[in-house]
Amino acid sequence: ANQVTVNWGSAEPLGEGMRVVLYVNGEAQDAPNSGGVTLQLDRGEHQVYAVLRDAGNRRIAATDTVTFFVKQHSVNF
């Protein structure tokens, strides 16, 4: 079904007004501040990273970019 789960977390609770923005293939998506999301992606190469932003929308921290590939099996497989 081409579902990919992306998880993240923090050793410390996030401060008031802080939020996580998830970038999937360069496009920003709002995300829960902890836990993860399940994405529905087409086959091929994808990149994901998360950015922590403060109440003023300033970038506080970011994860490394993770590159992965979604493989779709043939119906003949």
Image (cartoon, rainbow, N blue to C red):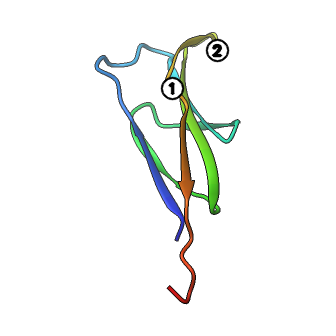
Q: What residue type is labelled 1?
A: Asp
Residue 43, position as x, y percentages in the image: 63, 62
Q: What is the C-alpha distance between the residues marked 2 and 1?
A: 19 Å
**5 shown above or below 55:** below
Q: Residue at x 54, y 76 (%)?
A: 73
Q: Are marks 2 and 1 in contact (CB under 8 Å)?
A: no
Q: Which residue is drawn at 50% across and 18% down?
A: 18
Q: Residue at x 63, y 10 (%)?
A: 56
Mark 2 vs mark 1, foreground winner is 1
Q: Residues within 10 Å of mark 1 (few under 14, many from 20)?
A: few
Residue 5, position as x, y percentages in the image: 44, 51
Which mark, by number, is residue 42?
A: none
**73 shown above or below 47:** below
Q: How crowded is mark 2: few (under 14 residues within 10 Å), some or many (20 or more)?
A: few
Residue 29 in the figure: left or right of residue 62: right
- Label 1 SS: loop
Residue 69, position as x, y percentages in the image: 56, 53
Q: Which residue lies furthest to the bottom in this view?
A: 76
Q: Residue furthest front?
A: 77
Q: Nearer the viewer, residue 39 or 45?
A: 45
Residue 74, position as x, y percentages in the image: 57, 81
Residue picked out by circle 1: 64
- Label 2 SS: loop
Q: Nearer the viewer, residue 53 or 27?
A: 27
Give the mark nearer the N terminus: 2 vs 1: 2
Image quadrant of residue 71? bottom right
Q: Which of 25 and 8 is in front in this view?
A: 25
Residue picked out by circle 2: 57
Image quadrant of residue 76? bottom right
Q: Residue at x 52, y 71 (%)?
A: 1
**44 shown above or below 75:** above
Q: Which amino acid does label 2 sit on?
A: Asn
